[in-house]
Amino acid sequence: MKVPASTANAPPASHGIAIPKAPTGIEGFDQISRGGLPRGRLTAIVGAPGAGKTVFAIQTMVNRLTKLGEPCIFVTFEEPIAQIRANVALFEWAANPLAEPPETTRFHLVDARVPEDAVMTGAFDLKGLLAVLTALTEETGARNIVFDGIDMLLSSLHDEQLERTELLRLDAWIRKMEISAIVTVKTFGTRDREQVRADFLQYMTDCLIILAETVTATGSSRTIRIGKYRGSGFAANPVPIVIGASGINVIAIKSERIGYPTFADRVSTGIARLDALLNGGYLRGNSVLISGSPGTSKTSLGVSFAAAACGRGDRVLLVSFDEGAEQIVANMVSIGIDLAPFVDAGLLTVASFVSAGVSPEEHLIQIRDMMDAGRPDCLVIDPISALMKADYPFSAMICEDLLNMAKSRGTTVVCTSLLDQVSGNVELSASTISTIADTWLHVSYVARDGERNRAVTIIKSRGTGHSNQVRELVLGASGIDLVDVYVAEGEVLMGSARAQKEAEVERLHVLDEIAAGRLHVTLERELSEARSKVEAATLELGWKQREADLSNVDEASRLEVGRAATRDRLDLRRVKDDIPTAEEILGSASSGNG
């Protein structure tokens, strides 16, 4: 049987039986721990001061009380109860049981701090405290307990062996009571005793959670890692966390692709010719990446899409890391895009963030919260490369999680990405999301004859036919347009070079038309002359024919006259002998008269 990738490296459950777990209510952590923390066992949370140990523990207890109805006990060895209540009040939780009156709440706070003026005499142990907690547990029915900052108590023992004894005593009590327990312990990383204590906790506890903070040149980032989990599989790699108004947010790495809603209809890019190149526009619910160097109109393309979406009644969230909201609205007027009416109508929300000094995971949570509040149909992020930091290991994960979150809601996402360097020929993206984006447009510069022109190319568009031709991107007062480039002898011409070449071709075309006209006139003249010659020859032929006919008639007449004369001579010759004389004729005539 093939083992799924998400569990291939996970340790098997004890004796083939799944260990019982209780969810923390922190969604990302419950995902990487595959269900939450172990039931009836001890979990240790270790980390440096300020890493979020107490917040994690309190949030888990609050969620179990409010969502599962399980009473909780919180034992503090470090902060006063009043301070804990004040800190929790800052979180925007739907329910805050710490704000309820002590006599009605099922979230019980126990102050176990050692008084500052206490004098340690003789041996010290946890028996007294555990006896009090046993009675409280039986009275309240609590099934969850937190020992917060127990290292503060253990450090007062001044003996490593005593520390281990008390920790083992605590573990035995937890197992006897069958209660789910969390212990928080500080680690400084430079003190031998704290490290020894942390190492012993790794051995003793059933689940070990390590919180850490990493400071780099570009900022700080908190992470959470499960170092150990007996009887259960888990994601062992560290993942980023954010402590915000909603408490701890764990950004879990998903082990498999989640299902997305799919759509057949398309949404306009805001540019008619770009829509035509994409067979009607972007597919709804898809993710689009527009990459390019500074000044290649990436923002204009993203805002053009946003304006088109608002124009058809969609809600749009536009997140900018480059400019303020007012500046974006003002700048877009120069290319014929007026965003103010959409902002006033509530269709467009423009959020301007500063990438410096804020971790990428914090931005992710901010965007997620805004999407939860506004439920936008479309999301524009300009540029998403602001979340990419060279010394930050989770950049790709943050960007991918952002796209996954939007696509799982059916939101169409358009992201711009800034290239690391100006490059008009190399189609690269500053972020790795180009591999998961459904459509990738690349805008670049083409420098020639002392000017720069913008070019746009559709590198890919999953699930739809698209043009592979380069187009020139033109910005004007009437908006954005795409112009067919001019290819001459294998070279792509844009801008004035294209206009000059087109003018040259037009001039040559006119010259060709003039030459063709002249040739036509010459041929017409020659044809007319030929017709005239033909007509003259025809007339000459007619006269010649008439002369020939007359000559033939004259010849025939002469022949006929000759034949007649011949006949006459023949006739004279034939009748010569019996022809009467004149006297005979006359005499005959006279006889007749008498």
Image (cartoon, rainbow, N blue to C red):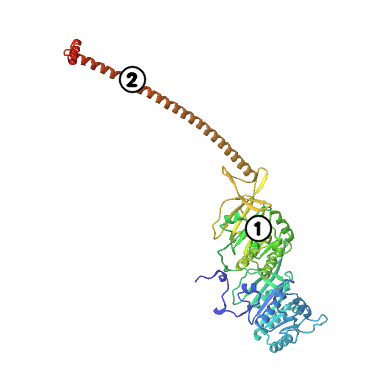
Q: Crowding near pointer 2: few (<14 within 10 Å), some, many (20+)?
A: few
Can residue 78 be seen by looking at this rendering? no
Going from N to C along the chain, the mark reached first, 1 or 2, is 1
Of 541 and 145, nearer the camera is 541
Can residue 403 be seen by looking at this rendering? yes
Residue 42 badge: none
**Where residue 333 appears, x then y in whole percent?**
71, 56
Q: Residue pushed farthest top? A: 583
Please determine whether, in this image, residue 101 is positioned above or below residue 237: below
Which residue is disc 2 drawn over?
Answer: 554
Please determine whether, in this image, residue 128 is positioned above or below residue 155: below
**Where residue 373 appears, x then y in whole percent?**
68, 70
State the count of labels.
Answer: 2
User: Residue flagged by tag 1: what amino acid is it?
Assistant: Ser
Judge from the rendering whether residue 162 lies leftward or rightward of residue 515; answer left or right.
right
Which quadrant of the rendered structure holds the C terminus? top left
Determine contact: label 1, label 2, CB under 8 Å: no
Which residue is disc 1 drawn over?
Answer: 304
Of 419 and 574, nearer the camera is 574
Mark 2, secondary structure of its residue:
helix
**Where residue 273 appears, x then y in whole percent?**
60, 54
User: Residue flagged by tag 2: what amino acid is it?
Assistant: Asp
Q: Quadrant of residue 568?
A: top left
Of 98 and 133, nearer the camera is 98
The alpha-carbon separation of the residues under discs 1 and 2 comes to 100 Å
**Where residue 288 appears, x then y in whole percent?**
61, 60
